[in-house]
Every structure is written in structure tokens, then in C-alpha cells.
Amino acid sequence: MNETLVRAEHLHRSYRTSDSEIVALRDATCCISAGARIAVTGPSGSGKSTLIQIIAGIDTETSGSIAWPGLGAKGGLRPSKIGMVFQNESLLPPLTALENVQVPLLLQGTQPEDARSAAREALERIGLSDVADKLPEELSGGQAQRIAFARALITAPRLILADEPTGQLDRATAHHFFDVLLQSLAKTDTALVIATHDASIAQRMHVTWRMQHGALETDS
Ligand SMILES: Nc1ncnc2c1ncn2[C@@H]1O[C@H](COP(=O)(O)OP(=O)(O)O)[C@@H](O)[C@H]1O
Ligand SMILES: [Mg+2]
């Protein structure tokens, strides 16, 4: 049995507006183990991003509970061993590709020259050394997402959460992105959870979770 990284029970998340209540997540229970490959599917508005953000510790459940036994969440702090990739360009516009990849290491207190060489190696591994000095606006969508992914991986997280990372890419580029991603994670026990609309991407994962109107079905 693989180590449990995340355990969530009966998560409920609602938003109150002046005249109504929107339920984004209802009674969601799930578990993520080391090495998992999970696709979260479901129509727009079904609660995928809400679930991912609560798992990331960016958003907070209205009721229910979540624990991150394997992800370094100490003393009520957010779990630190999570890397995130978003749908839209999340690279910092004034920084080059190489500088973007260094940011998480610099925030952790890594020496700048060490961060720089680690980022160079990361770009080399994903075949993007030639765009190291380009700004995000000079990159193609596929290149930008691979850089965002390299940035998420640079601190060696134990869980990668990707929220529709291929949503803006054409199918061939999306699958290429996925080839790079799965290859980078091969031989690691880093877990991957990816929200996607695309059934052909979901099929490349081991497990599919389905969401509908805030309800989560995990088949387990
Ligand atoms: N900040 C918010 N305020 C109000 N409603 C929200 C907010 N964020 C999400 N929602 C609502 O919660 C539901 C689930 O949204 P979301 O998790 O983004 O779904 P998905 O990622 O599957 O498209 C939707 O009805 C959405 O409109
Ligand atoms: Mg979403």
C-alpha cells in the first residue's frame, strides 16, 4: 500500500451571494496516495477547480476535513510539497523562462547561483534550453505550459495538481505536453492529479474521478 499524501472527508464548499447559496462541492471524500495518476473530469462548473484548490490548501472547505499526512503541512500551515500548474498563463510576465523556473527555489532560500543551475538543468530535461532567455509573451502556448510545469517540479514536490493545463492547447500539443510530463514523473513516486475536459488525456491516467454538480465519484 502506497503512502497516503492527502485524505479528504465529506468536503463541502459553498458560496453565499446576497440572495442565494451556490454549492460548489458537496460531500466529497477522496484519498491521494504516492505515485497516483488521477484525472478529474466533469463539465464546466462541476467543481473541479474548487476541489483542486482545497486539496492545494489555497481554498478552505465550508465543512468536512482535509489532512495532508505526507505533504509537510505543519502547525496549520499550507502543505509545502505541492506543485501547481494552471490553465491560463501563470508565468510572471516580466521574468524570462529561466527566471520563472527559479522563483520557487529562490522563495525557499536557495542560493541564486544554485537556483539558476537547477533551472537550467530542468529546461534541458524538457528540451527547452533554447527559450531560456525568452519572456513569456515570446513563448508558444505549449512551451509556456511546459515551463510552468518545470517550475512546479523544481522543488521536487510529492504531489502535482494541474487544473486543465492543456485547456488552451491543440490536441497534438496537449499530448506532447503530457508526454513530457509523464516522462519527467516516471521513476518517481510523485502523485499527479489533473483536471481535464479531454477524455483522451484522462485515459492516460490510471484512475478517473468524475464530478457532477459538486458531487465527486471516485469508484473506491
Ligand atoms: N468565488 C466564487 N464565487 C461564487 N461562486 C463560485 C466561485 N468559484 C466557483 N464558484 C461556483 O462554484 C461552482 C464550481 O466551480 P468550479 O470549481 O470552478 O468548477 P469547474 O472547475 O469544474 O469548472 C460553479 O457553479 C462556480 O460558478
Ligand atoms: Mg475549473
Image (tube, helix red, strand yellow):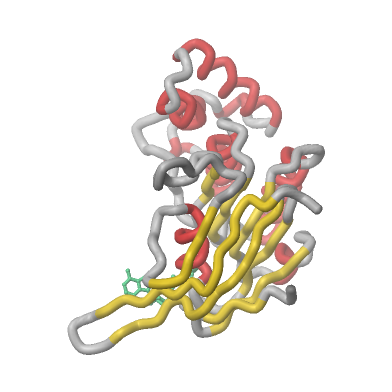
Does the rendering let one see residue 140?
no
Farthest top residue in view: 113
Looking at the image, is 134 positioned above or below residue 7? above
Q: Which percent across, then down, holds residue 11?
A: 49, 71
- The residue drawn where x is 72% and y is 48% is 3
Farthest front residue in view: 75
Asked whether, in this view, residue 52 is left or right of residue 171, the answer is: left
Quadrant location, ligand no. 1: bottom left
- The residue drawn where x is 56% and y is 61% is 164
Q: Which percent across, then down, holds residue 106?
A: 43, 23
On-image quarter of the C terminus: bottom right
Looking at the image, is 101 positioned above or below residue 33? above
Looking at the image, is 23 positioned above or below residue 109? below
- The residue drawn where x is 51% and y is 30% is 101
Does the rendering let one see residue 41?
yes
Looking at the image, is 120 positioned above or below residue 181? above
- The residue drawn where x is 63% and y is 72% is 41
Q: Toward which corner of the image does residue 185 lie, by quadrant?
A: top right
Q: How many marks?
A: 0
Q: Which percent across, then down, holds residue 13?
A: 40, 73
Q: Which percent across, then down, holds residue 8?
A: 56, 64
Farthest left residue in view: 18
Asked whether, in this view, residue 173 is left or right of residue 78, the answer is: right
Asked whether, in this view, residue 127 is left or right of residue 105, the answer is: right
The foreground one among 117 and 77 is 77
Asked whether, in this view, residue 19 is left or right of residue 220, the answer is: left
